[in-house]
Image (cartoon, helix red, strand yellow):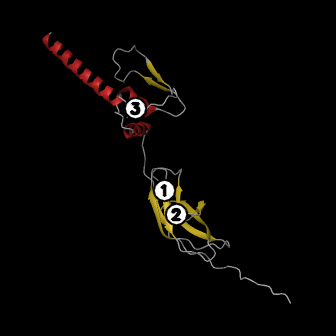
């Protein structure tokens, strides 16, 4: 006589993710985290769904993970996104959706000039003159052509341009003598301007 053991198929859905939290990281990223309880056949994966807008309803899967956190990147600045999460267990039973959370990405920079200025200052480098102008107008993979007119060049030929290219040599301006030299040059210009004004007053 043969004995056979039968196991009932798991039809119990996994628990619903709770405490879903969305955190705005930048103008292009929102991070999600949540909590969950153990499942009798282990949670296989969490599926993250997103739609655009605070009151949207057309959710679509943007990723899945075995962790209880997820980084949603490549988003649009100043845009509202809504999220929900559900689990799928080892028997492929889908759970119910978590509550919906909504967040709006930060607006970021409104112009290339502002973006460049922020990058320049964030690295601890003084932002003025041709150097600051180059950083603000720089584009990856391209040379920068800076018209001298309007940049305080003094004595440059009419119609002259400065062409700046990436030499591939890395420099750390913030930890170098750059800021000190800029300050010394500014002080020198201030002294020369003061002397010039004195000479003008005497004539």
Badge 3 density bin: few <14, some 14–19, many ≥20, Cα 10 Å? some
Give me the residue at 50% from left, 67% from top. Answer: 34
* Local SS, label 2: strand
38 versus 184 height, above or below: below
Q: Position of residue 53 (x, y in %)?
A: 49, 60
| Residue furthest left as drawn | 202
Residue highlighted by disc 1 = 30
Q: Are marks 1 and 2 in contact (CB under 8 Å)?
A: yes
101 versus 156 height, above or below: below
Badge 2 density bin: few <14, some 14–19, many ≥20, Cα 10 Å? many
Spatial CA distance of label 3 from label 1 is 31 Å
Residue highlighted by disc 3 = 173
Give me the residue at 43% from left, 22% from top. Answer: 147
* Quarter of the view holding residue 109: top left
Q: Position of residue 100 (x, y in %)?
A: 50, 67
Which of disc 1 and disc 3 is earlier in sequence? 1
| Marking on residue 43 | none
8 versus 130 height, above or below: below
| Residue furthest bottom as drawn | 1
| Residue furthest top as drawn | 203
Spatial CA distance of label 3 from label 2 is 41 Å
40 versus 201 height, above or below: below
Which of disc 2 and disc 1 is earlier in sequence? 1
Q: Are marks 3 and 2 in contact (CB under 8 Å)?
A: no
Which of disc 2 and disc 3 is earlier in sequence? 2
Q: Position of residue 3 (x, y in %)?
A: 81, 87
| Marking on residue 83 | 2
* Local SS, label 3: loop
Left or right: residue 193 versus residue 49 is left
């Amino acid at each position: 006589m043969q004995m056979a053991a039968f196991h009932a198929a798991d039809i119990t859905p996994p628990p619903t993710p709770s405490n879903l939290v969305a955190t705005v990281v930048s103008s292009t990223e929102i991070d999600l985290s949540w909590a969950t309880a153990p499942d009798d056949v282990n949670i296989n994966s969490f599926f993250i769904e997103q739609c655009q807008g605070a009151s949207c309803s057309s959710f679509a899967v943007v990723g899945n993970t075995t962790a209880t956190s997820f980084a949603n990147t490549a988003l649009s600045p100043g845009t509202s996104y809504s999220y929900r999460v559900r689990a799928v267990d080892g028997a492929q039973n889908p759970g119910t959706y978590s509550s919906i959370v909504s967040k709006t990405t930060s607006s970021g920079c409104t112009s290339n000039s502002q973006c460049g200025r922020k990058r320049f200052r964030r690295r601890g480098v003084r932002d003025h003159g041709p150097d600051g102008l180059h950083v603000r107008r720089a584009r990856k993979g391209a040379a920068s052509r800076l018209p001298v007119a309007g940049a305080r060049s003094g004595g440059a030929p009419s119609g002259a341009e400065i062409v700046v290219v990436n030499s591939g040599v890395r420099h750390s301006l913030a930890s170098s003598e750059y800021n000190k030299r800029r300050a010394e040059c500014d002080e020198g210009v201030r002294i020369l301007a003061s002397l010039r004004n004195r000479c003008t007053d005497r004539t």
